[in-house]
Image (tube, helix red, strand yellow):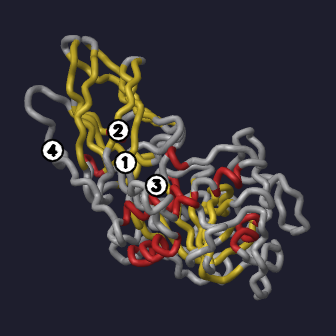
Amino acid sequence: MSPTRTRLAIGIAAALALATPLALANADAATTPATVRAASAAAPAAATSYTPAEVLAGIQKNSTSATQVNTKPHINTMTRAQNVNVYQVASGVYAYTSSMAIDTDGSDSDPDPDHQGDTTWQDSNGQALGAHHVPFYVLGDDCWDRTSPCPHFFYKERGMSGRQFALMFYNGKVIGSIFGDTQTANNQTTSDNDSRELGEASVKAAQLLGIPSSGTTGGVDSGVTVVMFSGSSWVVNGTNATLNDNAQALVQKALDTLGSSMAGGTPPSSPPPSSPPPTTPPTGGNKSYEAEAAALAGGTTVTNCAHCSGGKKLSYLGNGGTATFTGVTEPTAGSYTMTVSFMSVGQARSAVVTVNGVNQTVSFPETPDYNTVVTKNVTVQLKAGSNTIEFSNPTAGAPNLDRIVV
C-alpha cells in the first residue's frame, strides 16, 4: 500500500532469471514447456495446449464494451489517468491492462522510504508476503463508492480472496502471480492512495517481467495485462520460499484453461437463468422470508436491488459473512422445498445452508447480470414449529440473496 509517488521513466531492465517466464513468441525448445508441444508425431493427440500469444490475443479480442464489468473507470496507478477498465474475458476470469507501480511492502526489507512491513494477505504460515520473493498484484481494499454492486471492479463481488492466481503479460513475457496486497480503503486517510487504482505489483513480479523494480524509480506506465482467475480452486498455497515456484507451475494450466474457455476468442455464454422469482409467494400456504429481514453478521449487508422482492438484497455474504432466518414455521415435521431467489454474477458460487444445526453445501449457478434474479430449489428437513436457516460460506463469497420461500 505504498503512497503514490513520482517515478522516473527509465529503460526496461533485463529480466532476472530467478524464475523464467514464458515467452509470448515461439520459444526455443530448451525453454518452452513440453506441454506446449506434441510429445511426438506418433503419440496420440493430447488436449489442446495454448501458447501465451494465442491466449493474449483472445483476451484482447474479448475485452469489449459487452464484457466490461466496471461502470466507472479505474485510475492508472502510475499516470493517475482514469482510463482503466476490467473485462470478464471468460467465466470467472477478469482482465485489465494498466501500469505497473512497484509495491515493496511485506516481510522483505527494502530501502524504499514508503516500505511497510505488512501485506494485506499472508502466506500459508501466516507470514506477511515478501515483495522480493513473491510475485503479487494489488487491488482496491473496498468499494470506493460504498454501493453494491460496486461501479468499480471489487474483488469480494467476484469470488476472489487472498493469494488468488493471475497471469501477468508484458512485452513478450507471461508469469504467474497472486493477489497479495491492497490499495487504501475508505477508512484510511493517511495515504494518497485510492481503492479505485489498478496497476501495482511486487518487486518480484516486476523482475520476472523485465520491468525496473525499484520502489522509488521503477515501474512502467502502461502495457501490463493482469488476468485474474476467481474461485477457491485458483488460490495458491505455499510459503514465501515456495509461492513463486507454485505460481509459475500453474501458468500453462491457466493458459490452457483460459484458451479452452475462450474457444478461439469467444467467451462462453452465461448459463441460462432459471425461471424468474415469483412476484407473490407460491400457492399452497408457502411463506416468503425477505433476506433483508434476516439476522446478519460478519460483513453481510443489505443493499438496494430494483429487481428484487422488496427492493433489497444481501451483499457480501460469505467469506465469514452470514445471514440467519429465524421463525421459519411449519405445522408438521418433514421434507420441504425451499426456493431461494439469488444472483451470482461473474461465476457460480456455493453456500452452506444450515437448518437447525444440520449443514448442507448448495451450489448456485452463474447468473448473467445484476438485473436478473433467478431461483433454485433446495430440499430441507424442517421440524414442526419454528426453524432456523442460516446461509454462510467460511472461505469464499456466496451468492447475493433476495429471499427464500418455504
> x%, y% of residue 347?
38, 52
Q: Nearer the viewer, residue 396 or 372?
A: 396
- Which mark is on residue 60? none
Per the model, the C-alpha gap separating discs 2 and 3 is 16 Å
Q: Separation of disc 2 and disc 4 at Cα? A: 21 Å
Q: CA distance from mark 1 to mark 2?
A: 7 Å
Q: Quadrant of the N terminus?
A: bottom right
Quick check: 149 left or right of 145?
A: left
Amino acid type at image mark 4: Pro
- Residue annotated with mark 1: 348
Q: Disc 2 residue type?
A: Ser
Where does residue 148 sit, x and y in percent of width and height?
43, 57
Q: Residues within 10 Å of mark 4 (few under 14, many from 20)?
A: few
The answer to whether mark 4 and mark 1 are in CB contact below 8 A is no
Please give the name of the residue rendered at 83% of the width and 76% of the height, measured from the top-left corner: 216
Secondary element at tag 2? strand
Q: What residue appears at the point 53 percent right and 38 percent down from the top-left corner? A: 395
